[in-house]
Image (tube, rainbow, N blue to C red):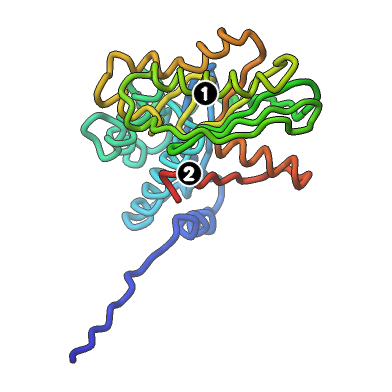
Amino acid sequence: MTRKTIKRPEFQAPMSALFEIYEGIAGKPDVVSIAWEREGGKIYRYDLPIPRRLDPVALRAVAHVVERIAKFIVWAAGGWKLYLSGPDEIVRPIARAYTPRGARAFDWDFFTSIYGRPVEAVVVPHSKMPEMSEKPRRVKTVADGCRIGFDLGASDFKISALKDGEVVFSKEFPWDPRNAPDPAYHYAKITEGLKEAAAALPRVDAIGGSTAGTLVGQKMGIASLFRAVKEQNPDKFPEAQNLFFRLEKDWGVPFAIYNDGDVTALAGMITMGRKGILGVAMGSSEA
């Protein structure tokens, strides 16, 4: 029997390279700026100070860190337009990467699908970089009155009804949304559950829900729940994306829908009484 020793390849976390960049700054630094624009004029921007003089090795290290930051921001905050400012040899290759055939073609296609418009990447002078402009959605944590909450999963969805903070109805509804090519199926199933929950209340004051997938406001971007619609019945996909607007109109009460990770973080904040909570939702696609 022959034994082989497998050596673990050298691994350096991007943050380690970032610290090395900071340590190499002497005097007034240069700056690389990265900003992603998304719906409602929201801008997420990050400014990275870098040494003014970089040898070829340091240049590659800085370019790698900047590329990682650009990718992290779009996956953390979203965006349809990337603004870059800094040395051409660093920022222009990143701009070229966010094209249909570039190194970040997957990211380009993913976020183009979410926002319904082609992702752009532009290099601009530092004076033309947009400023940070984040507008968090305010969420009330009240439980008075008559409220319905739901959570959409891939194998079932859960619905609860509360009256002045007390649970008066709770049920799981089996369904198979991933294999349903017509959004009428999703609409009918969710409506069925909401009506059953509403029957346990004297009235409905508000409805809130959580779902896997990406949301732009209350419009679905990409979600495995509507996978069959997009793949088999693409003409119906806009109808699926606007499903929650239709439900809101049906019920005529305040209606809010959030990503399940966001709702998990909110639940953690309420339960622990602390802010700065990271929510992780382990659904059917991740468990």
Residue 275 location in percent, x, y? 73, 42
The amino acid on which the numbered mark 2 sits, given as a three-letter code, is Gly
Residue 55 location in percent, x, y? 35, 55
Q: Is residue 259 left or right of residue 82?
A: right
Please name whichever residue, 214 or 184, is drawn nearer the observer in this view of the structure: 184
User: Residue shown at 33%/58% (left/top)?
Assistant: 57
Write down the quadrant of residue 114 in the picture: top left
Residue 23 location in percent, x, y? 53, 58
Q: Is residue 20 visible?
A: yes
Residue 30 location in percent, x, y? 49, 42
Please name whichever residue, 143 or 222, is drawn nearer the observer in this view of the structure: 143
User: Residue shown at 42%/19% (left/top)?
Assistant: 241
Write down the quadrant of residue 90 in the picture: top left
Q: Nearer the viewer, mark 2 or mark 1?
A: 2
Q: Element under label 2? A: loop
- Please tell me whether residue 250 is drawn above or below residue 133 in the rendered image: above
> Can you identify the residue that label 2 sits on?
283
Q: Give the CA separation, mark 2 to mark 1.
A: 36 Å
Sequence order check: which comes first, mark 2 or mark 1? 1
Q: Is residue 128 left or right of residue 159?
A: left
Number of marks drawn? 2
How many residues crowd mark 1 within 10 Å: few (<14), some (14–19), many (20+)?
some
- Please tell me whether residue 138 is drawn above or below residue 277 in the rendered image: above
How many residues crowd mark 2 within 10 Å: few (<14), some (14–19), many (20+)?
some
Which mark is drawn over residue 213? none
Please name whichever residue, 191 or 178, is drawn nearer the observer in this view of the structure: 191
User: The N terminus lies in which quarter of the figure?
Assistant: bottom left
Q: Is residue 81 left or right of residue 18?
A: left
User: Residue shown at 36%/37% (left/top)?
Assistant: 91
Q: Residue furthest bottom?
A: 1
> Can you identify the residue that label 1 sits on?
130
The amino acid on which the numbered mark 1 sits, given as a three-letter code, is Pro
